[in-house]
Image (tube, rainbow, N blue to C red):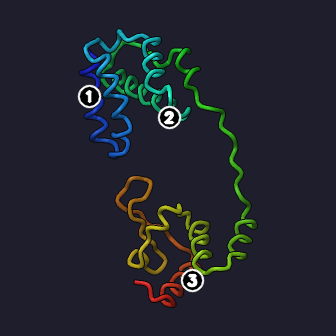
Amino acid sequence: MTTKEAMTLFNYYLQSNHKQRTIESYGLLLGRFEAIYGQRPLDSIAPDEIFHFLEDLTKDMAKSTRRLRYAQLKALYNFIIDRCSLNMRNPCNASLLSKSFKAPKQFQRKILERETVDEMIYNTKRQRDRLILELQARCGLRIGELLKIKVSDVSDRIVILRDPKSGKESEMAYMPENVSRKLAEYIKENALQ
C-alpha cells in the first residue's frame, strides 16, 4: 500500500468520525507527509525519516504542538495497521521518536475543597458573578458552556447546553432547586429574555 492510498483511507475515516477542527488540525501534517512520501510504500518509511520529517515540520513550534504532530502521525499508522491488517510495526513506536516527542510528566491537580468553593461563592459581591460560580460548582458547567446559555435554554431545573465540548448538538444539565430558584429570580429581576 502506498502512502497516498493510506492517506486517502485515513482522510475518509477522519471525515466520517471527527469534528471539522480535528480534521483541520490533521490537514497540515497529512498534506506535507503525502507530498514527501506519497508515492512510497507505507512500510518503507523508516523511523529516522519520520523523525527528520517531524523535526523539519515542527522546528519552530511549541513542545505541545510537536507532541501533537507526533501523536497524529502515530494515529495514522495505528489506524492503517489495524484496519488493513498490515503485518508491520508502527515506525512511530521507535525509541528515537517516543523519547524525542514524549509527553511531560503529569502533575496532580489540586482540587479545591467544598468549603473553599462555598466561601468563594459566598464572598462574591455581584449576584451575576455568584450565579456563574454556583452554576459551575453545582451543575458542573464549563465557563464556555455557561456563557452561551440563553433564557430560552432554562426550564425549571434544567439547562440546555448548546454546542457542548462533547461535540453533541446539545446536552442537559440539572440544577439544584436553590440554584434554579436564584437563577429564575435573577432572570425576572433583570427582565432578561
Q: Quadrant of the C terminus?
A: bottom left
Query: Gap in Å between the C-alphas at discs 1 and 3?
Result: 52 Å
Q: Position of residue 77 (x, y in %)?
A: 38, 22
Nearer the observer, 101 or 111: 101
Q: Are marks 2 and 1 in contact (CB under 8 Å)?
A: no
Mark 1 is surrounded, within 10 Å at the Cα level, by few (under 14), some (14 to 19) or many (20 or more) other residues, namely: some
117 to 16, vertically: above or below: below
120 to 7, vertically: above or below: below
Label 3 is placed on what type of residue? Lys
**Residue, far front:** 60
SS type, badge 2 = helix
Q: Is residue 181 left or right of residue 43?
A: right
Quadrant in which residue 8 is drawn: top left
Q: Are marks 2 and 3 in contact (CB under 8 Å)?
A: no
Along the polypeptide, which appears first: circle 2 or circle 3?
2
Q: Which mark is residue 36?
A: none
Q: Which mark is residue 65?
A: 2
Q: Which mark is residue 182?
A: 3
Q: Position of residue 177 (x, y in %)?
A: 56, 80
Q: Position of residue 56 (x, y in %)?
A: 45, 21
Query: Gap in Å between the C-alphas at discs 2 and 1?
Result: 24 Å
Mark 2 is surrounded, within 10 Å at the Cα level, by few (under 14), some (14 to 19) or many (20 or more) other residues, namely: few
Q: Residue at x 49, y 88 (%)?
A: 190
Q: Quadrant of the N terminus?
A: top left
Along the polypeptide, which appears first: circle 2 or circle 1?
1
Label 1 is placed on what type of residue? Leu
Q: Residue at x 35, y 12 (%)?
A: 43
SS type, badge 3 = helix
Q: Residue at x 57, y 83 (%)?
A: 182
The mark closer to the camera, 2 or 3, is: 2
Q: Residue at x 32, y 25 (%)?
A: 83
Q: Is residue 112 left or right of residue 32?
A: right
